[in-house]
Image: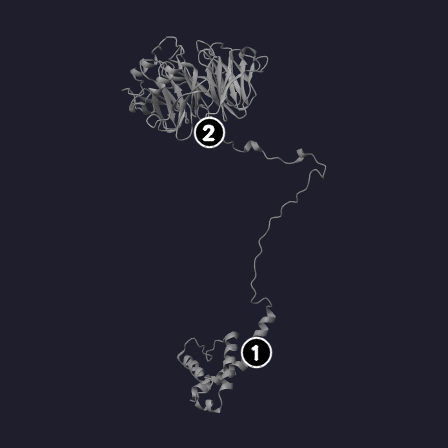
Amino acid sequence: MHIMQNGTTENLGLRRSARNIGLQTPNYCDPVRPTKRIRDEFEKEDSIESESSGPEENDTLSEFELKRLENIRQNQTFLSFLHLPQLAQMLNPQLGKRTYRKRAEAILPVRKSLRLQKKNPESVVMLDLSTVPKKNVMVHNVKGPVPMYPVNLQDSQLPEGLLHLWTEEPIQHEWKKVDLHVYKEGLQNMHRPEEQVVKVLKRWISSAAFHPCGSSLLMAAGDECGQVGLCSPGATWGDNGVLQFEPHTSSVSHMAFSMLHPSTLITASYDGTARAVHMERAVFDEVYHSDEQLKGFDFLSHDCSTLLIGDVQGEVAIVDTRTPGMSHESLHALGQGILYSVHVHPVQKQYFVVAVNSGVRIYDIRSLKESTQPVSVLDGHIRCVSSAYFSPDTGNRVLTASMDRLRVFDTSQLASSTPLMTSFDVGERQSMAPRRSQQQALWDPKQEDCFMVSTMKEPNKIKVFHESGHLAHMFDSPDQLTAVFSVIAFHPSRRALLQGDSQGWLHVLI
């Protein structure tokens, strides 16, 4: 074999060797017909071979190679005679083209203007909203009395130690307003012993109160799930001095003891019920039932037999617990927005003050049947008002807390417009926002002219102010405050301060 200058002979020899050993080279002697692409490639190669190879090249081919080439030429001549590719193209012009299935599109009705058609809006088909499930539907409690079975104990009997404290009469002595300097010293000496931190409930404490007994500390607390806990730190009865009950099915919004009848504890809940604890009969008796969520209440009479209960819709109900049944004596819609607190004047029981999101107003119960116009309006609130309370002894002051400031009004003379005494910012605006718990701006029942405010953000602080706006004391020591408290309360006769947090713990400063 002669090697040509352009190297064609060498390449041709390599291709022939690959064909002889069968490396990806189709055998055209096989009855299976090759495709058009393969035929075109080999025709091109054969044309190159024929051009590059002369008589000398044909002389060097073997007899088998010559026969193979002759068979290729005969096959090509026969295929060209049949005209198979042309016939296939004529029979199916779409051969080799990919087709796609179109998705069926929904035909929407054409929107037309009712105004242009001169039709009334009532002709439009409206949805039946009665079948749509409502969210946040209030779950009512079981009607009637609920037995006082402690859920954290196996024994259903109430301990004798609790019954003794519950029926103990409070210390009857007349508190007088002490000097502000002496009052400050008493606050500075308050501390929190380790045994005065007790796990009372499982969830967020939404309300709490001190029992007015003086021999020992007895506290009640309610959480956001409707549980009520009774606690006496250091007691030997119960679960380390704790008893848990389930009288409600929703958050306990407010609770209070009666000073004249300390064995009476009233609880109000978002489940629409108000219950009274009767320790002698060991039941939570239902005294009022409503279709609305109850927000707060206060004792309307001196013997604590009549209640003034407010709901979140701005309605107040007068309830006499001596009347059979669970209804109200009268119901009055104040119509001023969402109600956050209701408080009765400590001396003139016919007056009460309400805090709604639109402001603070004082009403006279005797005139509610004819008109719901307020006796006095406490102006000056720019943002939502979350609480309003009369001063504990005389009622000559009203303390209001809103999202922007604290305000003290002079209510010694009730008029259409009540004068503002003090207005100041405590520097913790977030603490004034309405929360799941009771609002944290409360008078000290032992000091007519001082009140406290609890902040709702870390680091937690409890500030005690004079009615003039002067800061009397601030509890900010880590030994005293270790959590952000949702509820605070003063003891009515002892120097003690109760604090409840979002984990169900009660902390007591004494």
At label 1, counting other C-alpha atoms closer than 10 Å, the crowd grade (few under 14, some 14-19, many 20 or more) is few
Q: Circle 1 sits in a helix, a strand or a loop, which is it?
A: helix
At label 2, counting other C-alpha atoms closer than 10 Å, the crowd grade (few under 14, some 14-19, many 20 or more) is some
Going from N to C along the chain, the mark reached first, 2 or 1, is 1
Q: Residue 420, how many percent across, how many down?
A: 53, 17
Q: Is residue 493 above or below residue 45?
A: above
Query: Which mark is on residue 329?
Result: none
Q: Is residue 362 above or below residue 119?
A: above
Q: Residue at x 60, y 70 (%)?
A: 91
Residue 291 visible in the current orientation: no
Q: Toward which corner of the image does residue 206 lie, by quadrant?
A: top left
Q: Residue 121, how many percent across, how many down?
A: 67, 34
Q: Which residue is mark 2?
A: 430
271 or 401: nearer the eye?
401
> In which quadrant will I find the N terminus?
bottom left
Q: Is residue 479 above or below residue 71?
A: above
Tell me how far mark 2 sits from mark 1, CA to CA: 94 Å
Tell me: 365 left or right of 498: right
Name the residue type under label 1: Leu
Query: Which mark is on residue 82?
Result: 1
89 or 375: nearer the eye?
375
Please identify, in this view, whether the residue under mark 2 or under mark 1 is nearer the observer.
Answer: 2
Residue 364 visible in the current orientation: yes
139 or 27: nearer the eye?
139
Name the residue type under label 2: Gln
Q: Which residue occupies the extreme top position in the image?
A: 173
> In which quadrant will I find the C terminus?
top left
Tell me: 501 left or right of 371: left
